[in-house]
Amino acid sequence: MARTLYDKLWDAHLVKQRDDGSALIYIDRQIIHEVTSPQAFEGLRLAGRQPWRVGSNFATLDHNVPTTPFKNASEIEDDTSRIQVQTLEDNTRAFGIREFGIGDVRQGIVHVMAPEQGAVVPGMTVVCGDSHTSTNGALACLAHGIGTSEVEHVLATQCLVAKKMKNMLVRVEGELGAGVTAKDVVLHIIGVIGTAGGNGHAMEFAGSAIRSLSMEGRMTICNMSIEAGARAGMVAVDDITIDYVRGRPFAPKGADWDKAVDYWRTLVSDDGAQFDTVVEINAADIKPQVSWGTSPEMVLPVDATLPIPEQESDAVKRSGMERAYQYMGLTPGMKITDIKVDRVFIGSCTNSRIEDLRAAAVVAKGRKKADNVKQVLVVPGSGLVKQQAEAEGLDKVFVEAGFEWREPGCSMCLAMNPDKLLAGEHCASTSNRNFEGRQGNGGRTHLVSPAMAAAAAVAGHFVDIRDFDSRDL
Amino acid sequence: MEKFIREDGLVAPLDRANVDTDQIIPKQFLKSIKRSGFGPNLFDEWRYLDEGQPGQDNSKRPLNEDFVLNQSRYQGASILLARRNFGCGSSREHAPWALLDFGFRAIIAPSFADIFFNNCFKNGVLPIVVSEEVADELFSAVQGKEGYRLTVDLAEQKIIRPDGEAIAFEIDAFRKHCLLNGLDDIGLTLQVADSIREYEASRQQREPWVFIE
């Protein structure tokens, strides 16, 4: 029978199907960070259990780490952050788990580090106590976020109790217009299907527009499948996938490599495979996107005007829009390009890979941050991304433009470290969530692509990247 | 995990859609390395007028009197009535920990985000899916009558209204079994450790590169 990519990944990891519909699936990789793991390790200790397969786990520090230079955990000023970082260090040492810690060039955001290291390769099941684990699905993996109880469960048993999800196909056909990036594609998809659109589904992204994207772009799209309601997003294997994995430190080598590639080539949805839900998107319809509200589905093309709540027929949606207007301090009907920006954040597991930094640097080169913009943070996703960017001279481009070049980490995506918005500030952000208070209490987030963020930094307000070069600033 | 059998409790209505886990428990409280103590900071940004910090004495903070959980009629509520896509966003299990610590044992909504839904069951919190129509009716009933209570009977899979009328709900058999008995998943899974080892051996043949040391 014709199977989807998700069906194949599920079947290949099924340890036991129970009569009641639940199943035990095997987990190949668990990625661990400091925020969602301490209680799991404590649980192991209390029960006197050991990790089932220690080598399957990869740990690093990302959420709490400062993005200003520091040498060890004791230099972290915030007591609670420091304790959490030290707790991970203690736990990985005690249980013998591999950790890329402070000062290790491999340290970085979990979802940047894992593919970069080849810790995640096609065909795997990948979990992490972090909802953006879906990022790894770009490598044709079944990858999704889990809670801390499940982190403990995977540590102890290498398995997860799961129920098979439904299959959803999001097909984006055609050619993307100039200035339209992977970030705009995924924001557009979320705008079309809503933040609950993928609930209960594993979401495969396909079509010529997806095929044309680099692995970095595919990761950006799978990263935000969770914002479309689907905890797992994925893309089938092709040459781009295999070229990306080749030569990475933990990827297979020699004869194993050839055998692996033969298998990985089968990780595509078969012709005629059945999807429960299919969404068709025309690539030509996608414009550069800017979110205006407090949910990722409140997103519009940059040339649009803000919606009028009275025109919304769904009462629950209408009240959500009214509340969003109040929080964001914006007026219905205003132009997106009239929204002024106080801070800019370029980074996060969505957009902190080398390609993202290059896209931002192209816009920043030879230009200066606008006077009304208080701060532009550029935060690479890992030490290796930082190293690569510096080798290409991107750091200099940013610094000359008045941007700040920082150390790797999650930073202002969720503001657990000192990088925060102040109440009322508008931020052009390449991150993934525009929830109330996400980037700092009272902060107002607008989700955009790296190029759009850099353009907003230079202009001081949102601008359409498509006519940026010809614009009189 | 505490068993969930039957909950008879006061209902609090949270009338907004897409409530995300950043709202349920803001990030500064995730720095705790414990599972308990999150209740005072549940919905922190909506409940208080100032910005909350971990380790603070919350009893001295200015309350947002407009927020539903601060209204006297809802004090002591153990059932939360919510709107669609409740618990979206971050996978933080601190969200159900905070709801439980505050005193909620059941959450009724037209839909839940997948990861949050799953996390509830690991903590003895029962998320119940009802239709949009039933949710609308319950919102009217709760908002219309002070002291409105519901009974949730898990064994019978029913929400029972004050007039005795019952609303049936669906739940996975395995999850129901675990909740009713307060079972620890890990112990159950380790009962089939041999199956896991068998699976590993066959995978190791097919994909040896997965099994790095």
Image (tube, rainbow, N blue to C red):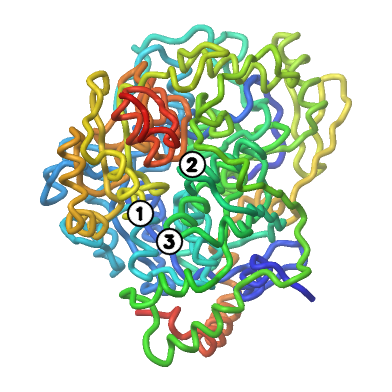
Q: Is residue A115 above or below residue A429?
A: below
Category of crowding for the residue at label 3, using alpha-carbon neighbours closer than 10 angstroms: few (below 14), some (14–19), many (at least 20): few
Q: Which residue is mark 3?
A: A47
Q: Amino acid at mark 2?
A: Ser
The image quadrant of residue A249 is bottom left
Q: Is residue B156 above or below residue B86?
A: below
Structural distance between the alpha carbons of marks 3 and 2: 27 Å
Structural distance between the alpha carbons of marks 1 and 2: 25 Å
* Residue at the (76%, 62%) spot, across then down: A20
Judged left or right of residue A60, residue B23 is: right
Image coordinates for residue A247, horizontal then vertical, percent: 34, 77
Q: Farthest bottom residue?
A: A255
Q: Is residue B68 above or below residue A178?
A: above
Label 3 SS: helix
Q: Which residue is mark 2?
A: B90
Label 2 SS: loop
Image coordinates for residue A366, horizontal then vertical, percent: 21, 38
Q: Nearer the viewer, residue A31 or B145?
A: A31
Disc assigned to residue A355: 1
Label 1 SS: helix
